[in-house]
Amino acid sequence: MESLDKDKTIKKIDEIIKTLSKSKAPLAILTDDEVKSIQNVDREDQTKLADRLEDLVVLLRDDPDNKKKIREVRQTAFDEFGHVSPVWDVLKSVESLF
């Protein structure tokens, strides 16, 4: 796993959210295998995962000093979706950055 800086971590989270929401926006960071892993999340769980990641990305952008809340949201997402490889990667990156 490559180490991601803050901006690249946020961009990768954005791309995961776009993939979950079936956006047709071009992806620059996610690999085809990562996209497949994300698309293999149960359909009913995809919305939940997107919501968790949106909460996290809002905190990272708008309130980066709120490390306690970032850790809480990251941990919840990790507990529920840490088994999905690209999600695990970005959540580990968030953990190392915050």
Image (spheres, rainbow, N blue to C red):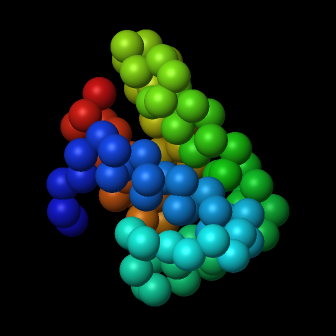
**Is 49 left, or right, of 81 in this rendering?**
right
Determine the residue positioned at 40% across, 80% down: 31
Identify which residue, 53 or 44, lies in the foreground: 53
Can see residue 63?
yes
Image quadrant for the C terminus?
top left
Q: Residue furthest front?
A: 26
Relative to 59, does residue 1 appear above or below in the rendering? below
Where is residue 56? Give x, y as percent.
Answer: 53, 35
Where is residue 29? Give x, y as percent.
Answer: 39, 69
Relative to 10, does residue 22 appear above or below in the rendering? below
Image quadrant for the N terminus?
bottom left
Q: In the picture, residue 7 is in which quadrant?
A: top left
Relative to 81, does residue 93 appear above or below in the rendering? above
Q: In the picture, residue 28 is in which quadrant?
A: bottom left
**Is 25 left, or right, of 15 in this rendering?**
right
Identify which residue, 59 or 68, lies in the foreground: 59
Determine the residue positioned at 57% across, 31% down: 58
Determine the residue positioned at 43% across, 46% down: 10
